[in-house]
């Protein structure tokens, strides 16, 4: 199974800019790089794969980036150098800058790195024009089906989308798979694990061990209060983010909360969605909405894997999944929410894409009352509004904007 991002990365191998692959831990960045390495080998493109967990190699490259050169094959062709875990270098930004400025005609670097690398200000400042960043999120539903070898269900989805009136006898199976996807999320190793209890244990390991690495590498001293914030955000995913209220609830300084939020965002665990407005007086609100980027991790933080039908927060889980689909399909900077001073609200607005649209998220279709959104529709007649609902689960689920 090849991730959806693979083709974009493959197309970028021939570009001069270095390729930087980002994403939360355990999303499959190293595996994806190995797929690219295999392509290079089968296509006759010279390449070398460096894992910087190798301490001897790390020590050499820390001494000078030029110590990379003896590891390269002797060839007239441009060499692709895959560098895994580049954040282990003492100065990864300087490493990339020097090699780009002096040797970009001879080599192309494709690198992965964790949050500590992207929190480094010099990454942005010194590598401007020298790199392109690609983000690998956790899997979407189509990738979920591929990893679970449910190709026949994926074929049914493609058939439904291609034929407006198509029906399927597999709709119950598709709903079961999607509900499992909402409960356990998109981490590849979790998807491929068949035992539900083991899935929960694996998510707990990601929650505790791998998130702990993010905490340590980001220089957080109070692990407990950071973790308490993360749990609180899981309970508030799809809601307004009131930093002052959180500060009072947890007894943590406002400035510390803001720093922790920045780290969580740089670690690709949360996103803060800004308000959309054209009328500053009526619409401007400073508060963002917050979303976790994986519903499995969200449920693990809440320690709740009950079926959606038994959950009081099933609407928040569904809205979080819908945000993730928009985030993956359109990019973080394209998604906004709309809210007026007197409480009118639309969950998602994408005003700047080629075909703008807005969408209200409801777990049940019956909860959507079009009259509640008349103000938005009249004010923004150029931005069509629809509802994306989970129940009833029919073939139309896979024909709407946010089905995966």
Image (cartoon, rainbow, N blue to C red):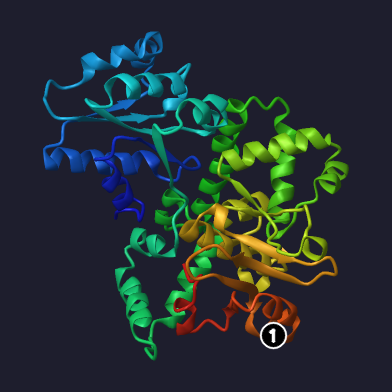
Q: Tell me what residue is drawn at x 37 percent, y 82 percent.
A: 160
Measured as percent of width and height from the top left, residue 316 is found at 67, 64
Q: In this view, does 36 lie above or below 335?
A: above
Q: What residue is drawn where x is 60% and y is 73%?
A: 359
Can residue 296 be seen?
Answer: no
Q: Which residue is drawn at 22% across and 18% down?
A: 71
- Viewer-nearest residue: 145 or 329: 329
Viewer-proximal residue among 312 and 68: 68
Q: Is residue 4 above or below residue 13?
A: below
Quarter location, residue 213: top right
Residue 109 drawn at (x, y percent): 31, 30
Q: Residue furthest top?
A: 63
Task: Name the one closer to the observer, 157 or 123.
Answer: 123
- The part of the image, by quadrant, that contains residue 312 is bottom right
Residue 284: % across, % down: 78, 59
Left or right of residue 248: residue 127: left
Q: Residue at x 48, y 55 (%)?
A: 186
Answer whether residue 101 is visible to the viewer in this image. yes
How many marks the image carries: the answer is: 1
Q: Reply above or below: 127 against 386.
A: above
Q: Name the residue under label 1.
A: 370
Image location of residue 112, percent across then percent down: 40, 34
The quarter of the picture where the N terminus appears is bottom left
Mark 1, other Cα within 10 Å: few <14 / some 14–19 / many ≥20: few
Which element type, helix, strand or loop, lies under badge 1?
A: helix
């Amino acid at each position: 199974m090849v991730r959806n991002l693979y083709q974009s990365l493959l197309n970028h191998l021939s570009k001069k800019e270095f390729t930087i692959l980002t994403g939360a831990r355990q999303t499959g960045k190293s595996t994806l790089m190995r797929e690219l390495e295999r392509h290079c080998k089968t296509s006759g493109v010279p390449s070398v794969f460096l894992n910087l967990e190798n301490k001897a190699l790390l020590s050499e490259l820390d001494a000078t980036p030029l110590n990379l050169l003896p590891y390269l094959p002797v060839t007239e062709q441009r060499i692709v150098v895959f560098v895994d875990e580049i954040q282990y270098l003492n100065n990864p930004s300087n490493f990339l800058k020097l090699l780009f400025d002096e040797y970009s005609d001879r080599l192309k670097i494709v690198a992965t790195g964790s949050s500590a690398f992207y929190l480094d200000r010099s990454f942005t400042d010194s590598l401007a024009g020298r790199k392109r960043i690609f983000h690998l999120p956790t899997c979407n539903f189509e990738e979920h089906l591929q990893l679970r070898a449910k190709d026949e269900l994926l074929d049914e989805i493609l058939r439904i989308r291609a034929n407006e009136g198509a029906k399927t006898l597999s709709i119950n199976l598709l709903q079961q798979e999607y509900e499992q996807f909402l409960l356990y999320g998109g981490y590849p190793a979790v998807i491929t694990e068949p035992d539900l209890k083991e899935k929960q244990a694996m998510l707990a390991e990601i929650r505790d061990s791998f998130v702990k690495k993010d905490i340590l590498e980001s220089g957080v001293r109070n692990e407990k209060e950071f973790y308490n914030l993360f749990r609180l955000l899981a309970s508030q995913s799809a809601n307004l983010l009131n930093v002052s209220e959180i500060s009072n609830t947890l007894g943590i300084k406002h400035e510390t909360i803001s720093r922790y939020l920045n780290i969580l965002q740089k670690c690709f665990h949360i996103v803060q969605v800004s308000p959309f407005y054209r009328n500053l007086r009526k619409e401007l609100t400073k508060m963002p909405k917050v979303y976790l980027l994986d519903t499995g991790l969200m449920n693990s933080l809440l320690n709740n894997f009950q079926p959606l039908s038994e959950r009081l927060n099933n609407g928040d889980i569904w809205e979080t999944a819908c945000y993730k689909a928009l985030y993956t399909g359109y990019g973080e900077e394209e998604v906004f929410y709309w809210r007026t001073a007197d409480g009118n609200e639309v969950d998602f607005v994408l005003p700047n894409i080629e075909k703008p649209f807005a969408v209200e998220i409801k777990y049940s279709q019956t909860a959507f009352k079009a009259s509640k959104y008349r103000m938005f529709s009249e004010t923004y007649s150029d931005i069509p509004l629809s509802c994306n609902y989970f129940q009833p689960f029919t073939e139309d689920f896979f024909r709407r904007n946010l089905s995966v």
